[in-house]
Image (cartoon, grey):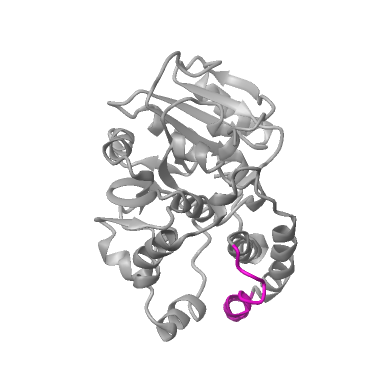
Amino acid sequence: MTWPPPYPAPRHVAGAPAPPAGSYAADVVILALDRAEETIEAIASARAQAGVTKHVWIADQGSRPESLQRLAEAVRGAPDATLVRLDRNWGVAGGRNRATALGRGRVVFALDNDAEFDGPDTLARAVAALDEDAGLAAVGCRILVHATGEDDLSSWGYPAALLPRAAQGFDAVTFVGAGHAIRRADFARCGGYDDALFFCWEEYDFCLRAIALGRRIRYRGDIAVRHKVSPERRFAWTGTRWFHYVRNRLYIEMKFGASPLALLPRFLAYQAKGARNGVLAQGLRAGPAAVRMARAFRPAPGTEALYRLDEAARAYIARNDAAHRGGLARRVRTEVLSRLPPARAGTAAS
């Protein structure tokens, strides 16, 4: 498998016309869709990272002209940052794929456009975490509320039982998109993100493929980004967010060999949660949509092993995820009967 595929070259808008010559440590990827003020602050935070060679990529996916102009002014003449305009909104998965393909850094750090690095050495420490542990494919950052420094609970993507360890580190089966670092070689081996997901669960889908190859994912509570609360251009639960959440999760399970019948209990649990939260119609539509996506999915030639979880991979998942979720009663209480959190984490653009 060759990655990246031959993506059309995006339109260069402002900043450096190309990444640095020769080798360098990291590409920082920021997707943009309006939110100009927050995005400019995210860019400034990325450019201010010290102690590491880097290039900052801002991929715009359809901002209004006035917002795009502000972004262009923020990086005009910058030697370490590039603003490009993609041909359309590819969502989180497709947008990050296309932005990542532009660089050559051995590590790719994705930063939400309403987030900032916690300190000037955050990027350097994320790169070092991957350099020091050859078994890691990716590192997930601790996500803090920008204004308070407290844990952003709506961005906690791990079992609730692990929340007391938020300041520590542990192996995991996913990472949170708001701030994470991926080894470029592993990103390529796994084929990047699945464009079809558009938004939601794309990180988990990537991590399953990495785990299938014997790689590990590590949460690092000592490496943090600060996440802001911004309602602009968000996917609300009452819009299509719950639809994407349910559809993509079921689709991923079917990609990895689960039958629709075997997923019926999960589907019904989602409907119970959707009914409790007033989004039942979205969940009901998501089931048939997931089946259609799974039927259309075909692994690229030579990549079939990415979608087979052997005994070692399943043991890794059981040890680092299922073991922390408790029995059926606890899972029903925490995962089915709970309210949906505010739509703070993840958007169509970031």
Was residue 275 drawn as part of the magenta stretch in this picture?
yes
The residue sitting at 62% across, 30% down in the picture is: 68
Q: Is 135 in front, or is 286?
A: 135
**Image point 46% across, 27% down: which residue?**
56
Q: Is residue 70 above or below residue 113?
A: above
User: Which span of residues is magenta-colored?
Assistant: 257-278
Q: Depth check: give the residue in front, 37 or 85.
A: 85
> Can residue 145 be seen by looking at this rendering?
no
Find residue 22 and report its horizontal and vertical position in percent. 42, 15
Quarter of the figure that contains the N terminus:
top right
Q: In the visual, does 77 lie left or right of 159?
A: right
Residue pushed farthest bottom? 329
Q: Quadrant of residue 237?
A: bottom right
Q: Which residue is pictured at 67% across the width and 62% down the height? A: 239
| Rendering quarter of residue 60 | top right
Q: Is residue 134 magenta?
A: no
Q: Position of residue 154 (x, y in %)?
A: 44, 61
* Residue 87 position (above or below residue 221): above
Q: Please name whichever residue, 266 or 78, is drawn nearer the observer in this view of the structure.
A: 266
Residue visible at 53% across and 17% down in the picture: 18
Expressed as whole percent of the image width and height from the top left, the position of residue 184 reads 45, 34
Left or right: where does residue 291 sit relative to residue 119?
Answer: right
